[in-house]
Amino acid sequence: MKRILSALAAAIALLFPLLCLGEPAPAAETALFAVSAGKADALILKTADKAFLIDAGYARSRGKILYAMELLGITGFDGAVLTHNDRDHAEGLEWLSESDIPVGTWYASAYYTGIKKESKHPAVAAAANRGQSVVWLRRGDALPLGDAVLRVLAPETLFTDKDDNNSLVLMLETPHGRILLAGDMEYPEEDVLLASGQDLKCDVLKVPNHADDDTASAAFLAACAPKFAVITTDSVEKPGTPDPYLMERLYDTGATVLETQDAEGGVLVTMGAEGIRTELIGLPETAEHITVAATDSERDLITLKNAGGSAVDLGGWYLIPDRKNILFVIPQGTVLAPGQSLTVGGSNADAAADLTWNVKRVLNKKKDDGVTLYDAYGNAVSYRADR
């Protein structure tokens, strides 16, 4: 009897850890948020415990990126990746580097053209603002993201004619599926990628180069065989996109196609144990009665006015002039009462301003320079030009 009891106790002891542990915890969901940034790329990847920004769009996309971060529960980025140097991918890196948003590491394509001094590279300049340096990526590199990995499939050689073909092409591999981010890759880089023989099969494809007519061949799409395809473009900003023939090729794959221009906020794709979900994300309503009431290029002053019946907190709202890649963020706690106005001026403005923009000149004296006011969520609220 003692021998039987002893054997039973040993069996229970072996079983006890299994009873306590139960089933393995399911892998956390992965999210791709493609911000509605016009004909531009600003993508957020979130895995179990990592968050990456892939391109930063134009400066004007600031509010939409911040709103996407809020929705995803992100307060900083483990990495910021610049796929290539086109303005519609790189311009937003400047405000990001000047913000208080943590960025662990800055990444960029190891191959680029059109930049004579490395210090002028937008990723290098952004990293330098933080006292950091850039990690250069090429085919074969991999970035661990917790239970996922971000692999670099291209580029592997320099194209000197067009920087689109030096785009980073990235494959996110997760327990629930694969996401292929193709930057602005055109046919020349695509040919090299296909010839490499790498596995391009994916569940979600970020269609290259805003679905223009110079990319995503039938052979490429057959190799990818995506279930979902996300297009980052605006047909007004870039007429002809998405290209109708490319769209036919996409539909032939059976993919569900989503376009950022169909949502004010962007496209959210979530992969998890229950499969893949997609959602078009809007933006909170804005206070449309806040206007750019006047612009005075002679005195370099911008006047904002509350033409409504209730006070509005303008903290986090921002201004962007037509001809400069700069923005001014209105300080937190700036409240504009009904009927009240406030002025914003450059540091050399010819008259006193309520708020000072720390640049020598905001508005161009010799041209009809205008300025756009955006709310904290990236809604374009008001525009005025000095005419």
Image: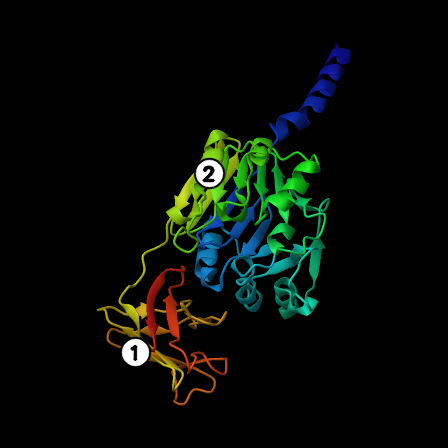
Badge 2 crowding class, 10 Å Cα cut-off, few under 14, some 14 to 19, many 20 or more, is few
Q: Residue furthest right?
A: 3
In the rendered image, residue 180, in percent from the top left (x then y), is placed at 58, 41
Q: Nearer the viewer, mark 2 or mark 1?
A: 2
In the rendered image, residue 360, in percent from the top left (x then y), is placed at 50, 83
Q: Which residue is mark 1?
A: 341
Residue 384's place in the image compared with 347, above or below, is above
The residue at the point 34 percent across, 74 percent down is 385
Quadrant into which the C terminus falls: bottom left
Determine the secondary structure under disc 2: helix
Most foreground residue, 276 or 116:
116
In the rendered image, residue 229, in percent from the top left (x then y), is placed at 49, 38
Residue 152's place in the image compared with 105, above or below, is above
Residue 79 appears anywhere in the view:
no
Determine the secondary structure under disc 1: strand
Q: Residue furthest top?
A: 1
Q: Residue furthest left?
A: 309
Q: Residue furthest front?
A: 161
Nearest to N terminus: mark 2 or mark 1: 2
Q: How many marks?
A: 2
Q: Which residue is mark 2?
A: 245
Residue type pointed to by label 1: Ser
Residue 325's place in the image compared with 79, above or below, is below
Q: CA gap, disc 2 to disc 1?
A: 51 Å
In the rendered image, residue 123, in percent from the top left (x then y), is placed at 63, 62
The residue at the point 29 percent across, 69 percent down is 290
